[in-house]
Image: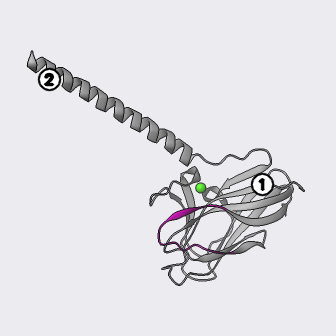
């Protein structure tokens, strides 16, 4: 009798534990889907995962997609990682615009202790100021506003150029997660 009761309780506890694990797993899966979903482009807003932009000119340093790491879940599960080693290192990637107009541009960027400082340009026109990628820990910025740009329908280019680094930074790397082009009211 006693043995049966204990066995029964044990089974109940095991069942509860299994249910709890299932709930945790389902919750994590939900969070994971939310955090990793690629940003959709819709209507007047165009979103481009940086890691999926088309490499169309030789980069002066290795350039590759980097999957989630270091406690960060990037949009689309990845960022574009540029392993620059000195000021002047640069790369240019291309993206296609489905409808011409005036757009406000913002970028979701990554900071880390080995990231340098750089500028971004669209079709050769610099947007925003110098971005200091240094942070003692790996962090994902919110949207960094880069200003406005007029774009015709068709292919355009984004160029990153390393300008230097924070004195505390140990290298000149750069990490870019997502670009957002939002059609401005005047466009
Ligand atoms: Ca991304």
In the picture as drawn, the residue positioned furthest to the top comes out as 1
Task: Tell me if label 2 and label 1 are in contact, CB under 8 Å.
Answer: no
Mark 2 lies on residue: 6
Identify the mark at residue 182; answer none if there is no mark: 1
The residue under the point 65% across, 48% down is: 39
Q: In this view, does 128 lie above or below 104?
A: below
In the rendered structure, does residue 132 fall within the stretch colored magenta? yes
Q: Nearer the viewer, residue 8 or 66?
A: 8
- Please identify the quadrant where the C terminus is shown: bottom right
Instruction: Calculate the distance from the C-alpha at mark 2 to the C-alpha at mark 1.
Output: 63 Å
Figure quadrant of residue 160: bottom right
Q: Which of 1 and 148 is in front in this view?
A: 1
Horizontal side, residue 137 vs residue 126: left or right: left
**Disc nearer the start of the sequence (2/1):** 2
Ligand 1 is located in which of the four quadrants? bottom right
The residue under the point 45% across, 38% down is: 27
Horizontal side, residue 72 vs residue 93: left or right: left
The residue carrying pointer 1 sits among few (fewer than 14), some (14 to 19) or many (20 or more) residues within 10 Å by Cα, namely: many
The residue under the point 9% across, 19% down is: 2
Q: Where is residue 74 in the image (x, y as percent from the top left)?
A: 55, 55
The residue under the point 75% across, 44% down is: 42
Provide the residue span drawn in magenta. 130-143
Element assignment for label 1: strand
In the picture as drawn, the residue positioned furthest to the right comes out as 186
Counting labels gives: 2
Q: Where is residue 150 in the image (x, y as percent from the top left)?
A: 85, 62
Q: Which of 131 and 16 is in front in this view?
A: 16
Q: Where is residue 147 in the image (x, y as percent from the top left)?
A: 78, 66
Q: In this view, does 78 lie above or below 90?
A: above
In the rendered structure, does residue 8 fall within the stretch colored magenta? no
């Amino acid at each position: 009798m006693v043995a049966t009761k204990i066995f029964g309780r044990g089974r109940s506890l095991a069942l509860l534990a299994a249910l709890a694990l299932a709930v945790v797993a389902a919750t994590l899966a939900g969070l994971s889907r939310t955090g990793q979903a690629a940003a959709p482009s819709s209507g007047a807003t165009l979103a481009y995962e940086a890691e999926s932009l088309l490499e169309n000119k030789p980069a002066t340093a290795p350039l590759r997609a980097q999957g989630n790491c270091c406690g960060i879940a990037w949009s689309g599960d990845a960022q574009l990682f540029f392993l620059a080693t000195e000021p002047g290192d640069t790369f240019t990637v291309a993206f296609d615009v489905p409808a011409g107009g005036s757009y406000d541009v913002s970028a979701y960027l990554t900071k880390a202790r080995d990231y340098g400082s750089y500028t971004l340009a669209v079709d050769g026109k610099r947007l925003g100021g110098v971005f200091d990628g240094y942070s003692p820990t790996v962090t994902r910025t919110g949207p960094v506003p880069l200003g406005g740009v007029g774009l015709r329908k068709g292919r355009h280019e984004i160029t990153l150029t390393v300008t230097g680094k924070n004195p505390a930074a140990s290298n000149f790397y750069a990490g870019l997660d997502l670009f957002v082009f939002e059609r401005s009211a005047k466009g």
